[in-house]
Amino acid sequence: MAMPEKDFYTLDEMAARWACIGFDGSSFLDLARKDLLVFSTYQRNIGSNRQVTETSEGTVTRTKTVFFSFKAAGYSSNGVRYLRAEDARRILEAKPGEEVAISGLFTSPTRTRETGTAYSELYLTVADLGISLAERTRFESEHGYASLSAG
């Protein structure tokens, strides 16, 4: 019995998958600039939490408190959120370890106003980026690499 397909792939996983067709991982930036590939991130919804980090300047504690949340009837989420091409481009152009502020995410790769979610302060790095299964399948099919998804 085969393992079920994952919903989300890291950029390293995608670069390795596409290496057989001559894909160079540095091409992600070009795909973002041209809005040919919809990048995503996995947003954990773990509720209230605290992270303590030791730095050369001392201990830094970040706390997130969730008091309530509204969910419509039938709501479901796999945690995958999609980025605007401009936000993905800025993240891919960032220096190593640099966090880039984005203005919002989307619950669908179509990235319509109705699927948008706003954030007052969300910072992402290249390590946070990935490609959803749905987007991987669409991209491979649209660009003539459907055989990769079949295998």
Image (spheres, rainbow, N blue to C red):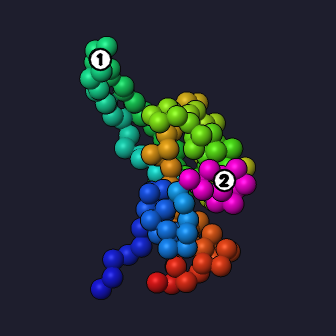
> Magenta segment: does it hold 51?
no
1 or 2: mark nearer the eye:
2
Residue stretch rendered in magenta on the structure: 26-37
- Image-based side of 146 in relation to 129, left or right: right
- Image-based side of 107 in relation to 1, left or right: right
In the image, 50 versus 32, the foreground residue is 32
Q: Looking at numbered disc 2 in the image, what kind of residue is underneath it?
A: Asp
Crowd class of label 1 (few under 14; some 14 to 19; many from 20; radius 10 Å)? few
Disc 1 marks which residue? 56
Q: Residue 29, image x and y in percent?
A: 62, 50
**Residues at discs 1 and 2 in contact (Cβ within 8 Å):** no
Q: Residue 90, image x and y in percent?
A: 63, 39
> Magenta segment: does it hold 35?
yes
The residue shown at (66%, 56%) is: 31
In the image, 82 versus 136, the foreground residue is 136
The residue shown at (42%, 67%) is: 6
Q: Residue 100, image x and y in percent?
A: 56, 34
How far separated are the C-alphas under marks 1 and 2? 36 Å
